[in-house]
Image (cartoon, rainbow, N blue to C red):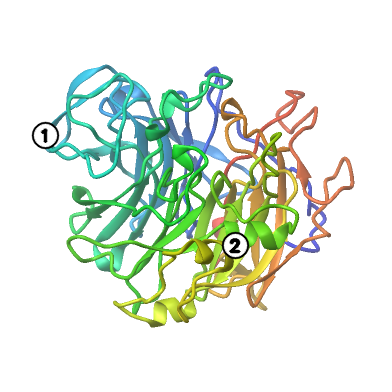
C-alpha cells in the first residue's frame, strides 16, 4: 500500500483459512509493530489464527488456537499485542458447553453455552497457544442496568467482551462488552431482548501479564436522549474502547454501536473509573446530512481510535437505514479534536446531559470539537491507522504522526449490516480527511478496492467480505 508502487491498489497475495464452514474471519489487533505476528479470529468457528508476516508479501500460518484450547470462551473477537509479542484476545461468547467452567486460576463461572454468556479474556503466546483463560464475569449479579441472557443465567451478567486495548505502562487493560452474540446474529429473526446489548466496560490488572485479573466492572450512564427502542439508549452496545497513548495521559474512550454515543473516563488506573458522555452522533449525523434528524440512536458506530499523539479521535459510523417513519442517517468517518478534554486532567467538565447538547454538541469548553466528517458510502465499520512511514533511508519507521487510515465497509451479514465490501484509504492532514483517489481497484478502476470480485491469487473463489485491516511490512523493510 505504498503510494507510487506498481502494485498500489492490487491484491498481491492471499492466505486461506479453510476448510471450516461459516468461519467468518473477523478482527485482528489494532496496530502492528516489528516482530509481531498477526492474530486473527474466526468469529463463528471459535478459532484464532496466527500469521507470520516477516517475509511479506508471503504469509505463513504459524499457529492455530482451536475451540478445545479455550473451553471457557467462544466467539473470538479482537486482540491486543503486547511488547513481548504475546496477545490478549476477547472471547465474546460463553463456554463451549453450558454449565460450570473452571478457568486457569481455578475460579468457576456458570455459562449458558457456546456464543452465549459469560465471555472471557484469553492470554496467548506469540504462536497462539493458550497461556491463561480469565473470567470476564464476577461472582456477583450485575444488575445496575439490565443484563439479559438467553437462556437466563442465575447470576445476571453483561460479560461479553468485544473491544480491547491496553496501557502496559499503567498495568491496565480495558475491554468493552457488546452483546450476547448468538442472539444478535439470527437475521432475519430480531434479537429477543434489547438488553442483550451491553452497557458495560471492564478494567483488568495486567501487572502480571500472563495472569490477567478482572479489577472492576463499570456501567456507562444513560444519557438525556430518549431511544426509539430500548437498545438505542446511549449506553447500549458498548462495542469499542480506545486508550490514550502519551505518558501524561491516563484516560480512555468508549463508544456504543446502537447507543450512538462516545464516553470518556480520565483515569483508567483508579479502582472504579467513572464514565461521562462527551459526544452524541446525532450532532454529526445532522452535519453530514441536513435532511436527517439529529438523532444518534442506531447510528452503528464501531471502530474508534485515538491518534497516536493524542490530538484526535477517529470514529467509523456505518449509519442507520431509513424506514417509512425514519429518515435514517448517512455513513461517514469522523474526526474529533480531544486536546482540550485531555488537558482537563482528572476533572473534565464536558457532559452531554441535556437534549440540546445531544443535538448541538457539549456546552462545556473542553468537549470534543468536530474537525471533519468524510462521507463514506457503503457503510464503514472498521478502520486502522497507518503507523509506518517510509524514511529517506528507504526503510519504514514507526511514527506517531499518522497521515493515513484505512476503513472497510462490512460488519456481519447475518445482522443485516452487510456493507458494500470495499476497502478504502484516507489521507489525513491536521485531522482533516480526504479519500485517496490514487488507491483504485485493479479491475474496475474505481476508488477503493472491491472485494466483490471473481478471482484472487488463491483461485476463482468469488466475492469476499473485508472486516479488519492492518498496516504491516516485511521485517527486512523496517528499522
Relative placement, left or right, of 400 versus 169 is right
Residue 198: image quadrant is top left
List x then y, in percent, for residue 209.
Answer: 23, 53
Q: In which quarter of the image is residue 264?
A: bottom left
Q: Can residue 473 be seen in this view?
A: no
Taking 262 as reference, is 428 above or below it? below
Tags 2 and 1 in contact by the CB under 8 Å rule? no
Does residue 185 appear anywhere in the picture?
Answer: yes
**Does residue 121 appear left or right of residue 294 in this picture?**
left
User: Which quadrant would the N terminus be assigned to in this image?
Assistant: bottom right
Which comes sooner in the sequence, label 2 or label 1? 1
Residue shown at the point (83%, 46%) measured from the top left:
441
Which of labels 2 and 1 is toward the front? 2
- Residue ID for mark 1: 107
Q: Name the residue under label 2.
A: 283
* Count of numbered marks: 2
Disc 2 from disc 1: Cα separation: 45 Å
Secondary element type, mark 2: helix
Dot 1 surroundings within 10 Å: few (below 14), some, or many (20 or more)?
Answer: few
- What x and y, as percent, mark residue 429? 68, 75
Q: Which of 443 and 376 is in front in this view?
A: 376
Q: How crowded is mark 2: few (under 14 residues within 10 Å), some or many (20 or more)?
A: many
Give percent across and percent down for residue 175.
34, 49
Q: Nearer the viewer, residue 438 or 474?
A: 438
Q: Which residue is drawn at 69% across and 35% down?
A: 323
Residue 451 position within the rendered picture, expressed as x and y whole percent measured from the top left:
74, 36
Q: What element carries label 1?
A: loop
Q: Residue 96 carries which label?
A: none
- State the image quarter where residue 435 is shown: bottom right
Amino acid at each position: 500500500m505504498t503510494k507510487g508502487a506498481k502494485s498500489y491498489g492490487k491484491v498481491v497475495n492471499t492466505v486461506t483459512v479453510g476448510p471450516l464452514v461459516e468461519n467468518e474471519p473477523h478482527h485482528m489487533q489494532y496496530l502492528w509493530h516489528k516482530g509481531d505476528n498477526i492474530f486473527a479470529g474466526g468469529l463463528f468457528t471459535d478459532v484464532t489464527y496466527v500469521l507470520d508476516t516477516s517475509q511479506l508479501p508471503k504469509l505463513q500460518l504459524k499457529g492455530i488456537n482451536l475451540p478445545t484450547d479455550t473451553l471457557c470462551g467462544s466467539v473470538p473477537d479482537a486482540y491486543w499485542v503486547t511488547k513481548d509479542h504475546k496477545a490478549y484476545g476477547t472471547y465474546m461468547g460463553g463456554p463451549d458447553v453450558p454449565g460450570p467452567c473452571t478457568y486457569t486460576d481455578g475460579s468457576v463461572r456458570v455459562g449458558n453455552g457456546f456464543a452465549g454468556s459469560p465471555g472471557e479474556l484469553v492470554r496467548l503466546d506469540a504462536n497462539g497457544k493458550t497461556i491463561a483463560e480469565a473470567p470476564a464475569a464476577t461472582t456477583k449479579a450485575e444488575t445496575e442496568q439490565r443484563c439479559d441472557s438467553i437462556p437466563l443465567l442465575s447470576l445476571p451478567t453483561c460479560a461479553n467482551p468485544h473491544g480491547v486495548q491496553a496501557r502496559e505502562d499503567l498495568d491496565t487493560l480495558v475491554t468493552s462488552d457488546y452483546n450476547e452474540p448468538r442472539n444478535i446474529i439470527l437475521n432475519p429473526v430480531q434479537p429477543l431482548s434489547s438488553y442483550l446489548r451491553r452497557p458495560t466496560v471492564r478494567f483488568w490488572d495486567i501487572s502480571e501479564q500472563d495472569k490477567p485479573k478482572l479489577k472492576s466492572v463499570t456501567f456507562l450512564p444513560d444519557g438525556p436522549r430518549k431511544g426509539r427502542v430500548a437498545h438505542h439508549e446511549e449506553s447500549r452496545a458498548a462495542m469499542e474502547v480506545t486508550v490514550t497513548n502519551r505518558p501524561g495521559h491516563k484516560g480512555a474512550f468508549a463508544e456504543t454501536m446502537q447507543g450512538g454515543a462516545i464516553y470518556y473516563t480520565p483515569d483508567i488506573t483508579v479502582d472504579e473509573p467513572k464514565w461521562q458522555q462527551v459526544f452524541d452522533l446525532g450532532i454529526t449525523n445532522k452535519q453530514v446530512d441536513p435532511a436527517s434528524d439529529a438523532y444518534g440512536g442506531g447510528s452503528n458506530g464501531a471502530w474508534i481510535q485515538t491518534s497516536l499523539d493524542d490530538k484526535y479521535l477517529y470514529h467509523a459510523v456505518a449509519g442507520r437505514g431509513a424506514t417509512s417513519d425514519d429518515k435514517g442517517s448517512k455513513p461517514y468517518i469522523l474526526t474529533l479534536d480531544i486536546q482540550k478534554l485531555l488537558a482537563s486532567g482528572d476533572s473534565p467538565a464536558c457532559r452531554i446531559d441535556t437534549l440540546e447538547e445531544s443535538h448541538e454538541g457539549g456546552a462545556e469548553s473542553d468537549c470534543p470539537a468536530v474537525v471533519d466528517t468524510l462521507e463514506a458510502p457503503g457503510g464503514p465499520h472498521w478502520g486502522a491507522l497507518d503507523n509506518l512511514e517510509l524514511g529517506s533511508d528507504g526503510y519504514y519507521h514507526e511514527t506517531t504522526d499518522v497521515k493515513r487510515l484505512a476503513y472497510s465497509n462490512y460488519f456481519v451479514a447475518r445482522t443485516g449490516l452487510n456493507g458494500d465490501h470495499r476497502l478504502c484509504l484516507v489521507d489525513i492532514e491536521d485531522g482533516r480527511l480526504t479519500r485517496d483517489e490514487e488507491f483504485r481497484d485493479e479491475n474496475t478502476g474505481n476508488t477503493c478496492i472491491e472485494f466483490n470480485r471473481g478471482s484472487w491469487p488463491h483461485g476463482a473463489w468469488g466475492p469476499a467480505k473485508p472486516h479488519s485491516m492492518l498496516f504491516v511490512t516485511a521485517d527486512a523493510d523496517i528499522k
